[in-house]
Amino acid sequence: MPILESTYKAPYFFRNGFIATVYSGLIRKVEGLVQKRERITLLDGDFLDLDWSYSENKSQKLIIILHGLEGNAQRHYITGTAKIFNENHIDAVSINFRGCSGEDNLSFRSYHSGDTKDLEQVIQHILNATQYSEIYLKGFSLGGNVVLKYLGATEDIPEQIKAGIAVSVPCYLAGSAKELHTFKNKAFHDKFKSHLKGKLVIKKLQHTDMLNDEEITSIKTLYDFDNLYTSKAHGFKDAQDYYEQSSSLQFLPNIKIPTLLINALNDSFLSPECYPVKEAKNNPNLFLEMPKHGGHVGFFQKGGFYYNEKRALEFVQKV
């Protein structure tokens, strides 16, 4: 599929990737969305919290939304998507990954960039409990990688899944991890590291045989975190093995339903490999859009809704 020419024009102030990223993550507000929480039990006995929001009239269409690293279903990039879809007669369910809904999950493991099994269980739960005839997937950053990997690596995707949208996706995890450790991303790196170490302190209280204070203190970088915890808790040899197995890039050629990937060229989290031009050109189902501006999940647009939200709605309406 030819690379899509983006129509996104960032206002002057938001052409700076850092400003676009920080404003959208810390300052933006989305008002008026009502969410209803549902807790489901997973096959391993752990739980996931799902936050539902509905269109005014009964809908046969649903969008499943996945957040990024250390996000949750109340982040405004999530609620913005849910709201615009609800206003256009499509219900929304926003997944809180394990340990991200305000309460630590039960098991030692949590979530990671390549975990498609929990998404599979959510989809199966929805198919068993509801009558939606059309389901769309939309993921941001880490959640976008999960969506792309699911669509490219899953053999039997339910027929109700009609389209995928992925935004600001580190589809080559090793390259993105390297970018996050550079000086330009120090503020973001340190914030993520602080949040993740804080969660390990809490998790250690319930899993004293799996973690100790000395190990947690030894974590100086996100790579250390992935090497000590993410890889070991989820069955990988080390951080590098986790990055290699979980990157969605290798699965993009196998995507068989219409899928839109929006990665801004000034996204400081992404390495050159995260712009899969060759894969998009060779797969008629993969639509790659690379706006010049937008930062990381920061596609500011006047009028309440962001560009990626309007673009996602437009994309599924044409499927």
Image (cartoon, rainbow, N blue to C red):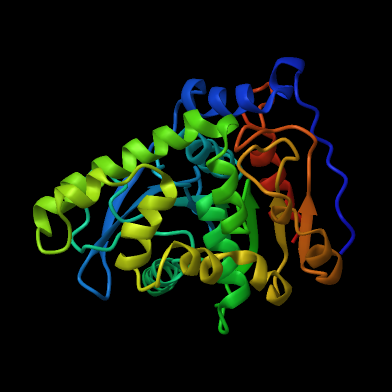
Q: Which residue lies furthest to the top in this view?
A: 13
Please state which of residues 112 and 57 is positioned toward the viewer in this rendering.
112
**With respect to residue 277, does 116 lie above or below?**
below
Q: Please tell me which residue is depicted at 67% across the width and 38% down the height of the picture.
A: 267
Q: Can residue 140 be seen in this view?
A: no
Q: How many labels does the image show?
A: 0
Q: Tell me if residue 224 comes above or below residue 319 in the rendering.
A: above
Please state if 108 lies on the left or on the right of 182 as rendered: left
Q: In this view, does 157 lie to the left or right of 131?
A: right
Can you say whether 86 is above or below 237 in the image? above
Residue at 47%, 24% in the rendered image: 26
Camera sees residue 3: yes
Give the image quarter of residue 239.
bottom left
Answer with left or right where residue 173 lies relative to residue 196. right
**Residue 36 x %, y %:** 32, 45
Where's residue 45, x and y in %?
20, 71
Rendered-image quadrant of the N terminus: bottom right
Residue 14, x across and y down, in percent: 69, 21
- Quarter of the picture containing the C terminus is bottom right
Corner quadrant of residue 253: bottom right
Say which residue appears at 66% left-offset and 33% top-offset.
Answer: 295
Q: Residue at x 49, y 20 (%)?
A: 27
